[in-house]
């Protein structure tokens, strides 16, 4: 007795539907492989399940892109790649070419692959670019050194000022003798005021020191 015919309609039970889908999917992919091998046919198969998961097969002797091109030519239907996608593809090619050129220029700036430069004009332009870059680096280096020297001087002045304040506090507390204090304070104030504008000069806290100075 042969198998009875199965009515072709949607299977309501989700478990049975998934089992049937899995079996028939594997079966149709198997048939696609067989016809590709037995008959030397070019086959491409794409299956999307209800869950959105994709399964596909394409004959080893071709590619999906080639099959689509042949399909467009023979069917006369609208191309799947519209003008927007064509422009996007061209833009990608342009960016790739630009990136390749930038990589070559970078290697040249590093001194690599110079032997590939056969035009004297290219060598002159490369030399000018390197000289300009070196000049900018030197200027930046000088700016950095000037700033470092300026900061060092500021720190020195702050240190002198703090030492003077500390010494004045020691005088006020009577922890050092008056003669030593007077001599030290006059010397520090002279050194400090010699490098400061008049408006910012430190005045001694002892009135008699002002007369001696």
Image (cartoon, grey):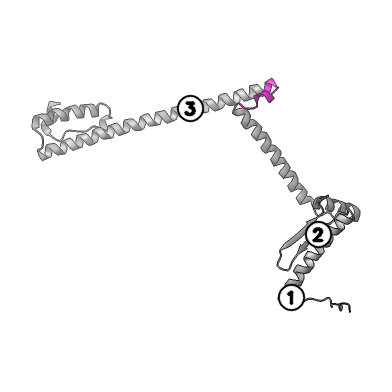
Whether 178 is drawn above or below 81: the answer is above
Circle 2 — which element?
Answer: strand
- Residue with the most extreme front position: 1
Who's the residue at 11% across and 29% down the image? 180
* Magenta residue span: 111-121
**128 relative position to 195: left or right:** right
State the residue in front, 155 or 208.
Answer: 155
Q: Which residue is mark 1?
A: 16
From the image, state whether disc 2 or disc 3 is nearer to you. 2
Mark positioned earlier in the residue sequence (3 or 1): 1
**130 relative position to 206: left or right:** right
- Residue 33 in which image quadrant: bottom right
As for residue 35 lying within the magenta part, the answer is no
Circle 3 — which element?
Answer: helix
Which quarter of the rendering shows the C terminus? top left
Q: Residues within 10 Å of mark 3 (few under 14, many from 20)?
A: few
Mark positioned earlier in the residue sequence (2 or 3): 2
From the image, state whether disc 3 or disc 1 is nearer to you. 1
Residue 77 visible: no
- Residue 105 in which image quadrant: top right
Circle 1 — which element?
Answer: helix
Q: Which residue is mark 2?
A: 45
């Amino acid at each position: 007795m042969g198998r009875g015919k199965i009515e072709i309609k949607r299977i309501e039970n989700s478990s049975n539907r998934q089992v049937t889908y899995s079996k028939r999917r594997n079966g149709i992919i198997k048939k696609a492989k067989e016809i590709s091998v037995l008959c030397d046919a070019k086959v491409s198969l794409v299956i999307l399940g209800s869950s959105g998961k994709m399964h596909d097969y394409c004959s080893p002797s071709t590619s999906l892109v080639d099959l689509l091109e042949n399909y467009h030519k023979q069917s006369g239907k609208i191309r799947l790649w519209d003008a927007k996608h064509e422009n996007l593809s061209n833009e990608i090619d342009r960016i790739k070419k630009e990136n390749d050129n930038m990589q070559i220029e970078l290697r040249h700036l590093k001194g690599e692959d110079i032997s590939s430069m056969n035009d004297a004009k290219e060598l002159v332009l490369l030399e000018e670019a390197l000289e300009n870059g070196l000049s900018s680096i030197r200027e930046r280096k000088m700016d950095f050194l000037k700033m470092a020297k300026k900061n060092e001087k500021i720190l020195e002045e702050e240190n002198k000022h703090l030492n003077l304040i500390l010494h004045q506090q020691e005088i006020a507390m009577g922890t050092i003798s008056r003669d030593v204090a007077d001599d030290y304070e006059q010397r520090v104030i002279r050194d400090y005021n010699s490098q400061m504008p008049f408006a910012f000069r430190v005045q001694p806290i002892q009135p008699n020191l002002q007369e001696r100075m």
